[in-house]
């Protein structure tokens, strides 16, 4: 009997180790992520209020104001991300459909490519994330975020591999 346990136990431990869940980097699992390929980036122009972010305990919600100027698109942002208040003000390089990257010096993780994952049909709610999962944020304009758009934004984040159990909603 002891010999059987010594033979079977290592095999069981090996099987248990091989079925570990996919490792999460940042706030999303590895896998595909999709940016909004049909959106005109001019649609995000204006002032947005932060209504949710990942790991945002410890700081107050911020916001972002996107502007079009002679050089293209720029932003003035103060966001609560990963429990820290982060700021970036400067130009954004449009790097693909629904994708932009700060062209000036930005603190991590704002220094990465930002992907517009979703914007509602009336351009009132905006979901931005990063391929590496270092941040994800829900922005809204025009008052409080209604429950139906929050559910849609959560669904989009989850579909793109984000761990929505770590999403903080204000």
Image (cartoon, grey):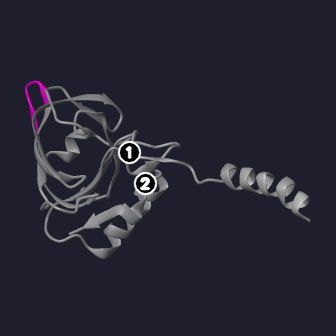
Residue 68 locus on image (x, y percent) = 11, 35
Question: Residue at (40%, 56%) from the top-left corner?
Answer: 157
Residue in the image at 20% along x and 40% along y: 42
Foreground of the two, 30 or 16: 16
In contact (CB < 8 Å): disc 2 and disc 1: yes
Give the residue at mark 1: 133
Is-magenta flag for residue 70? yes
- Classify the position of the C terminus by image quarter: bottom left
Q: Position of residue 60 (x, y in %)?
A: 12, 62
Residue at 30% x, 34% y is: 113
In this picture, is 76 found above or below 12? above
Q: Please state the extent of the stretch shown in magenta in the rendering.
A: 67-72
Horizontal arrangement in the rendering, residue 54 relative to residue 105 (left or right): right
Main secondary structure along the magenta-highlighted residues: strand
> Closest to the observer: 57 or 153?
57
Kindly identify the residue that appears in the image at 28 percent across and 65 percent down. 168
Is residue 159 shown above or below 110? Answer: below
Name the quarter where the N terminus is drawn.
Answer: bottom right
Give the mark nearest the N terminus, 2 or 1.
1
**What secondary structure is found at the residue carrying circle 1?**
loop
Q: Is 31 one of the magenta-colored residues? A: no
Where is residue 26? Give x, y as percent.
Answer: 38, 47
Residue 166: quadrant of the picture: bottom left
Q: CA distance from mark 2 to mark 1?
A: 7 Å
Q: Indicate which disc residue 101 carries.
A: none
Is residue 47 in view from this perspective?
no
Q: Which residue is mark 2?
A: 162
- Disc 2 element: loop
Q: Is residue 121 in view from this perspective?
A: yes
Left or right, 64 with respect to 20, comes to: left
């Amino acid at each position: 009997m002891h010999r059987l346990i010594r033979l079977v136990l290592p095999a069981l431990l090996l099987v248990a180790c091989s079925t570990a869940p996919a490792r999460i980097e940042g706030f999303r699992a590895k896998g595909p992520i999709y940016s909004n390929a049909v959106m005109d980036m001019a649609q995000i122009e204006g002032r947005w209020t932060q209504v949710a972010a990942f790991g945002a305990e410890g700081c107050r919600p911020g916001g972002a104001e996107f502007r079009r100027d002679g050089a293209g698109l720029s932003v003035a942002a103060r966001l609560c991300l990963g429990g820290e208040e982060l700021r970036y003000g400067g130009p954004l390089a449009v790097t693909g459909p629904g994708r932009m990257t700060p062209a000036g010096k930005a603190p991590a993780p704002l220094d990465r490519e930002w992907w517009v994952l979703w914007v509602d049909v009336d351009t009132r709610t905006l979901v931005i994330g990063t391929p590496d999962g270092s941040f994800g944020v829900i922005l809204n304009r025009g008052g409080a975020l209604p429950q139906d758009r929050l559910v849609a934004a959560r669904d989009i984040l989850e579909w793109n591999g984000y761990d929505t159990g770590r999403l903080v909603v204000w």
